[in-house]
Image (cartoon, rainbow, N blue to C red):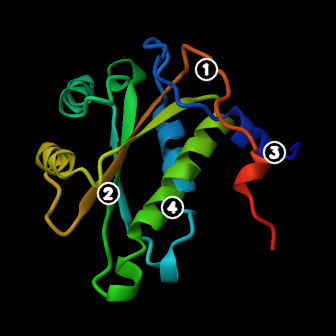
């Protein structure tokens, strides 16, 4: 690979252990959110909002209501991506792709800042969606899409993916 973006893609890992004494700064969280909002979206609808969390008691609540988000206990910060599906039928159907693109931008920007992240899905699990709506007072027409733990990594997991020629069909 070799260029800057390729290096970030290769370095990105799901981090589940963080240095609790070295949380992400407010400026770093802002940079992550700026990167998220630069993501492409269908018809440039930008169907998203974000909740940045640094309060320990809220991070603890996230871990209680999402069994796969225990890393929020040591992360020091988290970002909830909230989908705001457009009212028209065409772009409405693409909010998962749009929010996924925003999420990936956060993950890659975090690597560039020396931070670690772990993306945990909320949508389409109805129980999680309802729990997150309640915790963050999210309106019914908006959908909690995912939560991303953010912090300084305290582990270096091995790479898990690789290019597999057998999964590609050239035509």
Query: How packed is label 4: few (under 14 Cα within 10 Å), some, or many (20 or more)?
Result: many
Choose between 42 and 123: the one closer to the eye. 123
Q: Is residue 125 above or below residue 63?
A: below
The answer to whether 29 appears left or right of 49 in the picture is right
In front of the other: label 2 or label 4?
2
Q: Earlier in the sequence, mark 1 or mark 3?
A: 3
**Quarter location, residue 153:** top right
Question: What is the spatial separation of the Cα atoms under label 4 and label 1, in whole angstroms?
Answer: 28 Å
Q: Earlier in the sequence, mark 3 or mark 2?
A: 3
Question: What is the spatial separation of the Cα atoms under label 1 and label 2, in whole angstroms?
Answer: 28 Å
Q: Residue at x 39, y 31 (%)?
A: 77
In front of the other: label 1 or label 3?
1
Query: How packed is label 1: few (under 14 Cα within 10 Å), some, or many (20 or more)?
Result: few
Residue situated furthest right in the rendering: 2
Q: Which residue is mark 3?
A: 4
Residue 5 in view (yes/no): no
Q: Earlier in the sequence, mark 4 or mark 1?
A: 4
Task: Indicate the position of residue 161 as horizontal and vertical percent values.
Answer: 66, 37
Task: Indicate the position of residue 7 as horizontal and vertical percent values.
Answer: 78, 39
Q: Is residue 109 above or below residue 14?
A: below
- Of helix, strand and loop, which one carries label 2? strand
Residue 37 is labelled as 4
In front of the other: label 4 or label 3?
3
- Of helix, strand and loop, which one carries label 1? loop
Query: How packed is label 2: few (under 14 Cα within 10 Å), some, or many (20 or more)?
Result: many
Question: What is the spatial separation of the Cα atoms under label 1 and label 3, in whole angstroms?
Answer: 21 Å
> Cβ–Cβ below 8 Å for labels 2 and 4?
no
Q: Which residue is mark 1?
A: 157
Task: Indicate the position of residue 70 as horizontal and vertical percent values.
Answer: 32, 23
Q: Which residue is mark 2?
A: 82
């Amino acid at each position: 690979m070799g260029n800057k973006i390729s290096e970030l893609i290769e370095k990105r890992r799901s981090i589940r252990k963080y240095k609790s004494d070295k949380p992400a700064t407010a400026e770093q969280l802002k940079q992550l959110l700026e990167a998220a909002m630069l993501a492409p979206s269908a018809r440039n609808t930008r169907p998203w909002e974000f909740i940045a969390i640094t309060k320990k008691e809220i991070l603890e609540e996230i871990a209680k209501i999402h069994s796969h988000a225990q890393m929020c206990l040591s992360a020091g910060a988290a970002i909830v991506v909230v989908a705001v599906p457009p009212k028209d039928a065409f772009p409405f159907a693409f909010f998962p792709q749009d929010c996924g693109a925003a999420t990936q931008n956060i993950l890659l920007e975090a690597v560039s800042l020396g931070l670690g992240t772990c993306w945990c899905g909320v949508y389409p699990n109805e129980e999680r969606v309802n729990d997150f709506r309640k915790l963050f007072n999210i309106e019914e027409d908006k959908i909690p899409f995912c939560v991303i733990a953010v912090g300084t990594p305290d582990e270096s997991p091995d790479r898990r993916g690789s290019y597999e020629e057998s999964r590609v069909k050239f035509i």
